[in-house]
Image (spheres, rainbow, N blue to C red):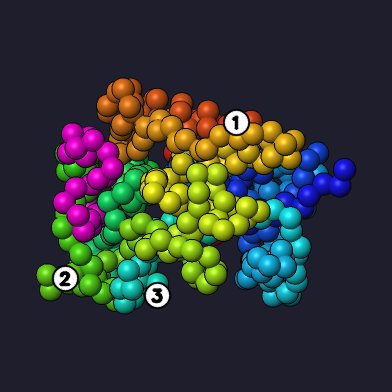
Amino acid sequence: MKKQKLIILGSGFGSFSTLKGVDTHLYDVVVVSPRNHFIFTPLLPSTTVGTIEFRSIIEPIRSAKENITYYHAYCTGIDAEKNSIHCKNALDGNEFDLPFDQLIIGVGAVSNTFGIEGVEQYGLFLKELTDARAIRQRIIENFERASTPNLPFEERKRLLHFVVVGGGPTGVEFAAELHDFLTEDLVDSYPNVIPDVSITLFEAGDALLNTFDAALSEYTIKIFQRQKISVRLQSQVAKVEADDILLRDGSRVPYGMMVWSTGNTQTDFVKSLPFERDRGSRLLTDEYFHLKGFKHIYSLGDCATIEGNLLPATSQVAQQEGYYLAKCLNAVAKNRPVKPFIYHHRGMLAYIGSNRALADLPQVKGRGFSTWIFWRSAYLTKLVSWKNKILVVFDWMKTFIFGRDSSRF
């Protein structure tokens, strides 16, 4: 029997989990993504300061599964009637079409700037390894510039003011990792300017980590206060300039680096598709991840939502969806019945600095050093390959023994 051609768009948690689980004896699998690797994003903040190295949390798509085809390209259009997609090579722009029998749209989402002027131009995001590397470079660059003799005091204070906008897990974990980098490593490399360093976290709402238990959120603020990380709640950014952030209350905040982490919005590609979407522009699916009106086109992850069942945009959700969809596709190819998707919430984890972490689990609310050990153990087991597991363990050991590297290259 001729195998059906299955095209998977994207290389995030949803798409990658589907790829790992689908049976290539049943499908001719093709992956199309402008990123030729999978990133274990829960550990991405750790790479911004060198706690973990970049390549330790990625898995190349081409070696992730045998008997697949990968194209380093963007999908720019879908013809649902002709069962084909139009693509553009991510490197040279060459265009081509690919036919499909089954299609999975798992292209993820992008950082939401809410249309605020200057964010795209002056802010740094934390979605990809290139973002993490840019942040790592900027931190060291600012310290080197601040160490210049005869630099005015106000300019040195500005360069060493690190701002995080967004009090969700990514923003909180980055602020925590930056604090550790400053107090454990940079204090020895730049002793003369460390007293002028400041970290400020802006959150538009009235709590950090608002998806966590309220007691854990309050605990995080207390820990940040001890670490001298300034937390400014109910602070909305109105405009971002090259050296200053303007808030809605009219105040102006000088900064040297700003990391923007305020949630997701849909890509222009998803917004352009001729399929039904919700108010947040996510593609609407049924409980089997079929797009409404199409039994051969699926969508999952941050770019989609099950109609009437809004799930959080987390890696845990996307991963469960991917594993389910792979089993579903394998069953369909064998003419076996499938059951609707059911999400099983296994809790949330977050690192808050100084070897402390939070665990908001269905049965337990943990915090502190012992939870940090659990946080590391849990993420280690979730890494996708033994190579990643070994590399991350060695990175943690290397950081503990030798500290983080502060070179700029």
- Was residue 198 drawn as part of the magenta stretch in this picture? yes
Q: Quadrant of the N terminus?
A: top right
Residue lying at 35% horizontally and 67% vertically, measured from the top left: 113
Residue 130 as seen in the image, left or right of residue 1:
left
Q: Is residue 299 above or below residue 40?
A: below
Amino acid type shown at disc 3 = Gln
| Along the line of sight, the residue nearer the viewer: 223 or 385 | 385
Q: In front: mark 3 or mark 1?
A: 3
Amino acid type shown at disc 2 = Arg
**Counting residues from the N terminus, which is met first, the one under dot 3 or under dot 2?**
3
Whole-percent x, y for residue 155 in the image: 25, 70
Residue lying at 45% horizontally and 49% vertically, measured from the top left: 306
Is residue 173 at least partly visible in the picture? Answer: yes
Number of other residues with Cα within 10 Å of mark 3, as a class: few under 14, some 14 to 19, many 20 or more: few
Disc sitting over residue 248 in the figure: 2
Amino acid type shown at disc 1 = Ile
Disc sitting over residue 76 in the figure: none
Residue lying at 17% horizontally and 61% vertically, measured from the top left: 235
**SS class, disc 2:** loop
**Counting residues from the N terminus, which is met first, the one under dot 3 or under dot 1?**
3
Mark 3 and mark 1 in contact? Answer it, CB < 8 Å. no
Q: Badge 1 is on which residue?
A: 390
**Counting residues from the N terminus, which is met first, the one under dot 2 or under dot 1?**
2
Q: Badge 3 is on which residue?
A: 121
Q: Quadrant of the C terminus?
A: bottom right
Whole-percent x, y for residue 220 in the image: 22, 39
Number of other residues with Cα within 10 Å of mark 1, as a class: few under 14, some 14 to 19, many 20 or more: few
User: What span is in magenta?
Assistant: 192-219
